[in-house]
Image (tube, grey):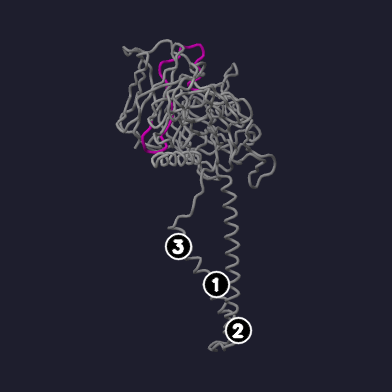
Amino acid sequence: MGVAGSALMLQRALLLLLLRTLAWAHVGSPDVYLDAQAGPYKIFVTVRPPAVIPGVAELEVRASNPDVRQIWAVPIPLNQLAARFAPVPDLLKVSAQDRQFFTGSLWMMATGSWQIRLQVKGSRGGGTVAVPVPSVALTTKPMSAGLAWPLGFLMLLLVAGLVLLVGASVREAKLLPGTVPDAEAKRRARRAMAMAFAIVAGLIGVGRWWWSSAEAGYRLKVYRPLQMVATLSPAGILQLRLNNPEWMNGPERNAGQNGPALFTRAMDDFIPDHEHLMHLYAIREPGLDVIYHLHPELIETAQFQLRLPQMPPGSYRLYGDVVHANGFPETMVAEVQVPAGLPGRPLEGDDAAGTAAAWSDTSSSTRFTLPDRYVMQWVRPEGALHAKVGMPFRFRLVDESGRPASGMELYMGMPGHAAFVKTDGTTFAHVHPNGSVAMASYMMAQSQLATTRLSNGAMSMPGMDMGESAVPNEVTFPYGFPSPGKYRIFVQMKRAGRVETGVFDADVR
């Protein structure tokens, strides 16, 4: 292997390591976006979870209607027992410049699968919705040099002052005014100062040990996603084995609480999300020109298997979405090399694929022509795209003449699915018409709200309650790019039994 090959392998290994540190519900995209219906009110919710736990989550809510007067919010663990003892909700602050924009801050006190319950009141009564939010520590926050140096100087000043004070008290405290201490008093003072310094240094050492021990304990709670190892047989069988990196997989308890654990992670508790235990995206690199949306089957604990369809050769980055029984979603990352001539099967069921021109620095698109000559359009807003700004991404499917496509169908119960991928591989988000949350988690949260149940017991979810009505040729995805850079957006809609995959590029400032 040449130097270039070795460098490429090292680069991929470092990138996979980085992705493992960033992956959770999505890869490198921790903010939660939800387009929800709270009773008669449509709201767009953005939650920015804290990077450390305990920590403060920032909450933004935009109401579509001007008749919303007040919104309350409260964080609750996503389980029936804890939900019964919800604390008093906080009233969100309405913007003085925009009466339809509300903001607030909420403490997330423990690791786990949480929900933020929103109570909306206005001229048409009230409504409630629950937003599932994974609450995990993603990092530790080191002390900055600008703060460490002044604090270090103050500590030295305090130590020196304390030692000098002890020396002065031993040397001169019992002397009459104007009396000069003798040599013996000075020796006693020096011994006392040495003893005081030793005691203070020992206390500082104990404090440093305690701090290091507490920091090490906290580092064990920093989120480590399930690891996924992919192997491909000559017959085209893809094996995905999940490994647990020993994070929250035992009887963990939250500090200061008694009773059963609020959150644990297991390897045998996956629940269906859109009727599948895993959604696997395979994206060819470096051009991001080929994408497959596949659904491996669980064959034994922590092992999935899939016979690959016919795929162009190349290196594929794999993103696997699963949801635990407690509502906690995870995205795992792996890589597989598909050789030329690998036997494959035709696409079947909910599996889908798409191809496009390789991404380049000049890529920019709002219109994508599909193989059957239909066209997918991105109804893109005017102006530049900016990071950390939640917005609706609207797409429509039309025929060659620009007429709305007929024969539209739901794709796994929804008008469409989207994947937002940063070209350097550090961001991946599988987004639905109602938002970036896992639908299994969302349904779990709504099931605890009696006011969100329909008369037939079904759940009211934007983009899913189609009933017997025709499926529209448009779909909207709430999302916000987590950081500046180049992104590729894959959008999938279903028409006449065929899953159409549109590909669009975005330059985010």
Label 2's element?
A: loop
In the rendered view, would you say 442 is above or below 498? Answer: below
Q: Can you tell which mark lies on residue 174?
A: 2
- Residue 342 picture location, percent across and down: 47, 22
Q: Position of residue 254 (x, y in %)?
A: 63, 44
In the drawing, does residue 486 fall left or right of residue 154? Answer: left
Q: Residue furthest front?
A: 1
Amino acid bearing label 1: Leu
Closer to the camera in the image, 503 or 414: 503
Task: Name the amino acid type tagged 3.
Answer: Pro
Please name whichever residue, 419 or 81, is drawn nearer the observer in this view of the structure.
419
Sequence-earlier tag: 1 or 2: 1
Q: Name the quadrant of the C terminus.
A: top left
Q: Earlier in the sequence, mark 2 or mark 3?
A: 3
Q: Is residue 12 above or below residue 309?
A: below
Residue 126 part of the magenta-drawn span: no
Residue visible at 48% across and 25% down in the picture: 434
